[in-house]
Image (spheres, helix red, strand yellow):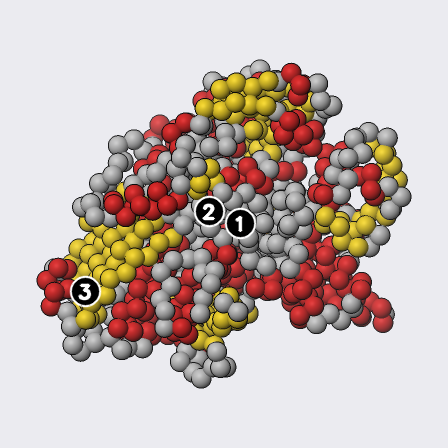
Amino acid sequence: MVRLSINGVDRELDMDPATPLLWALRDGLRLTGTKYSCGIAQCGACLVLVDGKPVHSCTTPISSVMNRKITTIEGLSADRSHPVQQAWIEQEVPQCGYCHSGQILAAAALLEKHPQPSDTLIDEVMREVLCRCGTYPRIRKAIKRAAELAQSDKEA
Amino acid sequence: MRSCKLTRRDFIKVSTLAGGGLLMGFPFTGLTKAQSDKADTAFQPNAWISIGTDDKVTLQVASAEMGQGILTGIAMILAEELDADWSRVKAEFAPADKAYYNPMFGRQATGGSTAVRAFWNPLRKAGAAAREMLLQAAADRWQVDPSDCRTEKSKVIHDDSGNQLAYGELVRAAATLPVPETVFLKEPDEFVLLGKPLPRLDTPLKVDGSAVFGMDVQLEGLLSASVARSPTIGGKVKSFDAKPVLAMPGVKAVKQISSGVAVIAEHYWAAKQGRDALQIEWDEGLNKGLDSARITAEFAKAIDSDGVVERDAGDIETALQGAAKTLEAVYTVPFQAHACMEPMNATADVRSGSCDLYLPTQNQTRSQAAAIQLTGLPEEKVKVHTTYLGGGFGRRGDDDFVKDAVECSMAVAKPVKVIWSREDDILYDKFRPATYNRLRGGVDADGRIVAWEHRIAGASIMGQKQRGLVPGKSDWSNTEGAKNIPYAIPNLQVRFAMYNPGIPVGFWRSVGSSQNAYITECFFDELASLAGQDPLQARLELMEGHPRHAGVLKLAAEKAGFGKKLTQGHAQGIAVAESFGSFVAQVAEVSIQRGRVRVHRVTCAVDCGMIVNPDTIHAQMESAIAFGLTSTLKSEITIKDGRTVQSNFDDFPLLHIDEMPEVDVHIMQSDEAPGGIGEPGVPPIAPAVANAVFALTGKPIRSIPIRHAG
Ligand code: FES
Ligand code: FES
């Protein structure tokens, strides 16, 4: 049995400890918001937050994240109220949408660390997450917008 | 309002929903009589519109949502003529059924940027007929003349009396009325939804992980499978040893299927581990030893064959002989993979007497047909449930992944989800065809382009599907974008010589235009430069009779300030293309940094006729530019020893956000019928960039991707 803390809930899994977190989430826990695309840490579709930092779940064995706080897209907010989600909706960012769990978590982690990121920093950090549909211009805009929303949340 | 007669072909059918709502069905497509009779009997579940007594309007959308925003677009068209309250409109994916055949294809499929074009008229009529019946029902109730009533936001209103009734209160009565023979369609200036940037209906589901893609389908007792395929394309299984794999944890079965050997397990990781451990001996088949260099050499040979003449004007040889200056160039484009972010996958549940398919598919009809063939079940027992698609770009019109799932489910008599790894997805893609092009051109002493010859040799998509389509025959998918160039050149010839090297090819976003626009628009700039002409002026001078090409070209040039003074080391390139009924021109501004092309800005002008949702048009242009930049600057598929060389994003790199230019999109106002929007932004980007590099370095770019420049 492997014990994991996912989105604030302790979960037990009867899976090989070498299983990548991605497949433990998707097949073991039926949390399918985390996506598979490359399996080799090249695309960011599978990003989750481990203690607040983005991690490629496709190459992370579950044995290495026991006792760590794991956040998936399902746990970012209960009601799409996270500033990044709100900005994503407002700017109509997703197209096919497949990459956006990863995009949103990467953006949330970026803003956590740099509440007012520069254009260059946004590009530098977000280059880790690929989008075949080319939603990049809107990702840039939405991150700026999310920064504003987060700021006004704080002030409120 | 414009009146519009409903013909027998419109086939509108009305019935009552359980609970009293109104259901309208429209098996209105290009069906044969026999097909439509069949559709009639199966009418009930095939409704396009249902209106509940609670006012909820539910629309069935036959097209696949792969990012292009069609779910919202189709719903807007129906809701517009229905005068539905947009906030209470819900859109669902329709099951596989003839009622949802795309009138442009005669099957239920999404591709060729046809969805809006094909459904525009039928959907508007459908919405208008429903609206009229509701209005009539209200007029009957109030005993007033229907022409004194109007509709708005799912209500019928009689202004004189101040009476109002919600659609939900009228549906019972409306369902008993005859379908009107004449309906009234709105004039564009009466639109309240169309032309507005309404938010997409699927956006909320795509920010919290709740949208269900094919990959995410869950069923009771669902198993996962991974299929080992021949490393050599087209090879076959000779023998394999299932035993050690069957002993691995979680593995349930190891079965040979048509595409290879499937390892079926409790979950995907176990299946993948099993598949990686599997020892298989392969018969490499015909492609053994085949490589890209040999394919190119064969193309180069084929190009001298007569092939088929696709367009012919004037006398090309005489014109070339008489020209003041001539130019000959060879342009090549490689195979390209689709690389949808969601790898191919499918779920099938084949039980005795039924088959349920859960598919991210662009082609419900083809998927259903494949399952019917494999299972022997009758059509009504094979159900297709369409999920969201994590990208499509033409790849998901195929049925190879569907067959995998059906065969696996049949082998174990349980529901099975087959997941292609990213490596499977790229190695065994149906690639955009590689082609080899030889062009000759001539300009006269006054600097006019007087001769243009374009010979194409390439693999044919249709040729691999249709028996009898052999070398010497025509294939539109190889020549679109080449034979329809808009330039009035007096001596012009386009030829196609088919050569099929045995590498599977398929439709790839914007198909033939994706490469032919690059080849023709770049060769045009070479000729303009030979003639000492400005690329924009040279184009406009030859564009008589093509006002929509000229319109977008001028608009893009004006918005980009084409020809203005730029930062040192920067240059602009311009290109225009028509595809799928829409016209797009782009200006790219580039520089070269350490041998690598950097695209700073793309200005895009689009004329796609009447506008459904302008925000979707913007998004699709941005998308097409990113997609096209990947193949212009980064990705290609090569073949070595019969195998695909590239297999994942490390060697088939996609565009990253830091390589994405600023994009400005300008939409032309137009009253023309709507054109496609998912694909037409792709063709002009490669030539706009390559022409900019040519302007900067003086060296033409005759093959892409442009990995090194300067
Ligand atoms: S699936 Fe993990 S980075 Fe691509
Ligand atoms: S929205 Fe489709 S891959 Fe990003």
For mark 1, name the chain.
Answer: B
Residue A92 in the figure: left or right of residue B492: right
Residue B223 in the figure: left or right of residue B11: right
Looking at the image, tell me whether mark 2 or mark 1 is earlier in sequence order.
2
Q: Circle 1: is it few (<14), some (14-19), or many (20+) Cα within 10 Å?
A: some
Front position in the image: B170 or B215: B215
Q: How far apart are marks 2 and 1 (CA)?
A: 8 Å
Q: Are marks 3 and 1 in contact (CB under 8 Å)?
A: no
Residue B73 position in % (x across, y down): 52, 53
Residue at x 52% of width, y 62% of height: B622
Q: Which quadrant: the C terminus of chain A? A: bottom right
Residue B586 position in % (x across, y down): 43, 68
Same subunit under labels 2 and 3? yes
Residue at x 69% of width, y 22% of height: B251
Front position in the image: A23 or B99: A23
- The residue under label 1 is B652
Image quadrant of residue B224? top right
- The residue under label 3 is B451
- The residue under label 2 is B637
Looking at the image, tell me whether mark 2 or mark 3 is earlier in sequence order.
3
Residue A52 in the figure: left or right of residue B366: right
What amino acid does circle 2 point to?
Ile
Same subunit under labels 3 and 1? yes
Q: Circle 2: is it few (<14), some (14-19), or many (20+) Cα within 10 Å?
A: many
